[in-house]
Image (cartoon, helix red, strand yellow):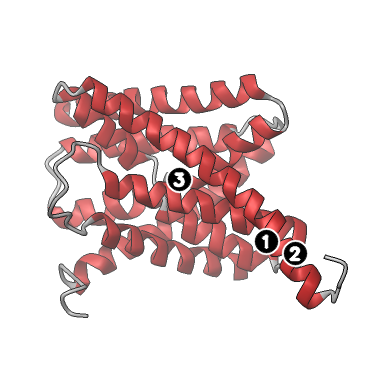
Amino acid sequence: MVKLLRGDIMEFLLVGIGGIFGSLTRFSLGKLISNRCKTYFPIGTAFINITGAILLGIISSIGASRNLYLLFGDGFLGAYTTFSTFMYEGFNLFQENDKLNGFIYILMSIILGILGYNIGTKIGSLL
Amino acid sequence: MRKYIFIGVGGFLGAILRFWIKTIPLQNYKELLPINTLFINVTGSFILALITTAALEILKMDVDIRLGICTGFLGAYTTFSTLCKEASELINRGYYFSSLSYIVNSVILGLAAAYFGVIVAREVIQKYVNKHINGDESI
């Protein structure tokens, strides 16, 4: 069991605490966006995932300490962004025979996410 | 308030489980694809679709518990930002094909996993509920 828990408990705690705030922020922000924009296109998840990728780019390139990266990168941003909801919503668009929107949703999220991460690293290295 | 506690607890556990799986060393794995993250995202997509479908269509699951498991635990377990980071790092190191392969595999397997989750919920859980809880012998 001790061998199973590579790394120390402190690292797991930092990631977990980041995870609490990441998932609560995603939930609150997602609700806010879907209340403001009455569209069936999952704009909330797209916004969250893309901003999360930009912020991960920044935190990865500002020379953050390991503990700060665990808390904010692996913990907060890992939990703030989500892949499972992204896939479920994408699948639902395909299932409801809205293939074009499903395709646009997935392609747009991936392209803007990768672009966002790289823009984030540029911003971070300037800071 | 209750749902925020459930989502927070789910997020705490989901993030830790992801971190734990991500750091498992694969001794004989020499490929470039970050297979730990791929595994996390695909299994998370399957379970999210399974539980969401079961909760909305079959079982009368408490809304706060569903939010805790799906939005909290599975939302924090799977990650999009790490996927973008790993794909970008492959591109920046010149492994364009590996990066494309990683993204395509994540999306295709993720969508397939969501599809199987919905099917398993409708076929397996629905039949189990009908047979053992509703006592329907006709199945």
Amino acid type at image mark 3: Thr
What residue lies at 29% left-to-right and 39% top-to-bottom? A56
What residue lies at 59% left-to-right and 51% top-to-bottom? B117
Confirm whether residue A86 shows in the render: no
Q: Measured along the vertical axis of the image, is residue B27 above or below residue A46?
A: below
User: Residue B90: where, in percent of width, then height?
Assistant: 20, 29
* Secondary structure found at label 1: helix
Q: Is residue B73 left or right of residue A91?
A: left
Q: Chain of mark 3?
A: A
Amino acid type at image mark 1: Val
Q: Is residue A14 left or right of residue A108?
A: left
Quadrant of the rendered structure where residue A49 is? top left
Between A43 and A98, the one nearer to me in the picture: A98
Amino acid type at image mark 2: Lys
Can you identify the residue that label 1 sits on? B124
Q: Measured along the vertical axis of the image, is residue A31 above or below residue B12?
A: above
Labelled disc at residue B127: 2
* Secondary structure found at label 2: helix
Quarter of the figure with the N terminus of chain A: bottom left
Can you identify the residue that label 3 sits on? A82
Confirm whether residue A23 shows in the render: yes
Q: CA distance from mark 2 to mark 1?
A: 5 Å
Q: CA distance from mark 2 to mark 3?
A: 31 Å
Mark 2 in CB contact with mark 1 (< 8 angstroms): yes
